[in-house]
Image (spheres, rainbow, N blue to C red):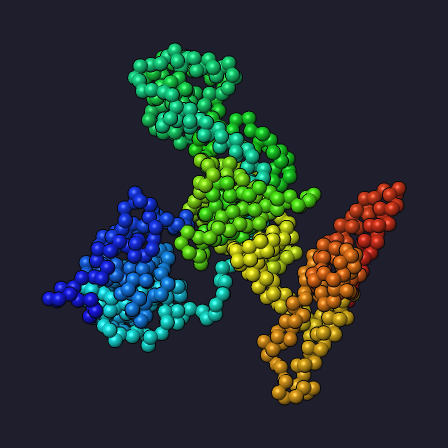
Amino acid sequence: MSLFTLPGGASESVFSGADVCFEAGLGLPDEARRPMFDDDLWDFTHVVGLPNQMSKVSRRFDFAAIINPRWRLVAKEQVMAMIATAHPQVAQLPRAYRTPLHLVTAFGRLAELTRFLNWLTSQGISGLDELDEHRCDGYLAHRRYLLDEDGGRVGESSPATRRAAAQTVVDLINHCSLFTSDAPPTGLRPWGGAAPSAIAEMPAGTGINKTPPVGDHVLQPLLAAALFLTERIGPHAIDLHAQVKDADRRWSLKSGDHKATTRLPREEILHVLADYEERDEPLPLLADHDTRRRIDQGWLPHDPLTPIAFGLLTRQAGVTQFYSRWLPALREAVESTLNRVGAAKQFARNAAPITLSDGSGQLPWTFPLDRLQATALIGIVRTAAITTLAAVSGMRSSELMELQVGCRRPPETHGPGLVRYRIASKVIKGQVLGGVDDEWVVIQPAYTAAGLLEQLHDNPVDGTALLGRFAFDVRYTWLRNWVNGPAGQRLGLAPIPDDSVNLRALRRTLALELAYRPGGVLATKIHLKHVAVATTEGYASRPGGAQAELLAEVNKHESEHNLDLVWEEFRNYQQGIMPAGPGARDLIAFFAHIDAKLDPADAPAAKVQRNDREILSLLTKRAKVLHLGPANYCWFTDPSRALCLRLAGTPTADRPLIGMCDSARCPQATHHPCHRPVWTDHADKTKAFLAELGPTRRTERTRLQADYDRAARVVTAIDTASGSHP
């Protein structure tokens, strides 16, 4: 029963007549209509500070979707308790929320609550007092399984879906004393009072990132296409965008200086045709689908005038619409002009040549395009810029959607070739409504991509949303289809496989690539060291910002990866596969020390360590000093012994200079079977160069011969230490 019952048995909600936004502390413009508690539709569209990522649909809370009218009031009271937690009647509930839910979360809770209440209606239940543990279990089972059209089970829903179902029931029970029109039994405790996450059997542990990275087979062609479109096609797309905007301004039906008339404007059209001849400019062609529509309407397929864009010619003559009955009177003049100047689609005529992506030659960057094709290509370039920005900056989707025109800060020059690029946005995740201003230190390709997006914007006024809300999965599909289609293949782009890609996966891929460097696909397309420096600088500039979180994720992956590598090499040692290189003796001694601790015959019973976890704990300290070189492992245990630091004159540095590593001479460097392909490839290429040198180039031959001999010695040492005989 409700605690809030008026005299005479009548009851009224404690929220009746309340201004929802006022109670929830949400700001609205003065002219906006304010949602009231008694409305069946709460429209939060104009609430100040809502993130661009929040869709327009999720800003409208529709309680009329609940079939049972009594339960609409229950749903309103439930949602109100979630977003207005400071209300006096909510604050006194023992299990009510103390922190208000974000509107995005509240919308999801309402959607699941609506689904639950309508399911109860379908089960013949008309009052929440009929709710019991059996029916709670029934709804959880209903949401657990995916059913086909015949009601057969075809799969199982995710733990998140099951948790949402359990959370809905728990919320109703926790707020039951607040409800006016109906309420579940006061003593109901389904599932033994367990937490929704436990009920849903969600995996234990916090901070588990289950987002898979983008596979190399997809990332390689995707990143190549994105960089090619951003850097090579982007400048031409800017000109194309200007052409389309100018044509729309001058000749579209919604703008331009033209008027409606049914009189044949013969003289005006003849003047337009004369201008085309004087400029030696081809007549405009229709889009292919418009030409097909004309043919369907009775125009002759082989008539040379069928594909001509008479509508555009007429608007250029100052008249809004072309009538087909005018064609006989104009045919002779139009055919004469057509024979002299020809015809082509309106945009990107005389496209400049560019070098193809695969380096096989040069071609015009595009064929002439109609308006639809031009805007589609501009959209493809925009998607490529978004992909580039996301892939090399690590920005979340919510942060990308908060970018504004003018977000690029002026470059900061700190010396020759030392330029710092910054992009301003907002951090939304985990922040108060409206987000928190933040800046990202990025590398030049990301900065260029943001600039390209500004120049391709329809209204490039500072403060305007640069991207707004967008569906990356849809855009990515368009990009992939374009790359795999005739246009992309013509430019020499490698096809992109049909795997799905999302922004979250791109961020995780960047984190893993930075953690696992120097290997990886990103390292072949961009300078990973520059990305790492930018991320670190962003962290140092704003320790509590978004790049701090990205760097923490990178460091976590790096620690885990290094521990896996040490574990793998320890297992190799146990199987007789030894490391090579100047630091091999120290590493073998360390592994022997660890291995000795595992022998129960040589250790007291209390210190016998047998399982993998105990071994890993012994290897963790060595993993912390492991640094990955392109062709070796660096065990940075003693800075004074690091050859790279001695060569650089910085013997007290706390990290090695991997770019200066000479692993064949450094006493802390080791070579392993995984490095053999790098050294073999280097030896083969050096040998090929030696074969091409003429007899007079003795100095160069001597240097290359020494380089080849060193690489061959390293390969031989790896084979000898590992016991392999290729």
Counting from the top left corner in percent of width and height, residue 492 is at: 59, 40
Image position of 438 with respect to 294: above or below = below
Which residue occupies 52% across, 55% down? 546
Counting from the top left corner in percent of width and height, residue 229 is at: 55, 40
Residue 107 in view of the camera: no
Image position of 612 with respect to 722: above or below = below
The residue sitting at the left extreme is: 8
Q: Quadrant of the C terminus?
A: bottom right
Q: Is residue 14 left or right of residue 669?
A: left
Counting from the top left corner in percent of width and height, residue 328 is at: 36, 14
Image position of 476 with respect to 633: above or below = above
Question: In this view of the protein, which residue sits in the foreground, 469 or 51?
Answer: 51
How many labels sit on residues?
0
Which residue occupies 74% across, 64% down? 639
Q: Quadrant of the N terminus?
A: bottom left
Question: In this view of the protein, which residue sits in the foreground, 525 or 554?
Answer: 554
Which residue occupies 39% across, 13% down? 268
The residue sitting at the top extreme is: 267
Q: Is residue 239 left or right of residue 122?
A: right
Image position of 424 with respect to 608: above or below = above
Q: Is residue 530 left or right of residue 433?
A: right
Q: Residue 194's quadrant in the figure?
A: bottom left
Counting from the top left corner in percent of width and height, residue 272 is at: 43, 15
Which residue occupies 65% across, 71% down? 621
Question: In this view of the protein, which residue sits in the foreground, 34 or 326?
Answer: 34
Question: In this view of the protein, which residue sits in the foreground, 645 or 720?
Answer: 645
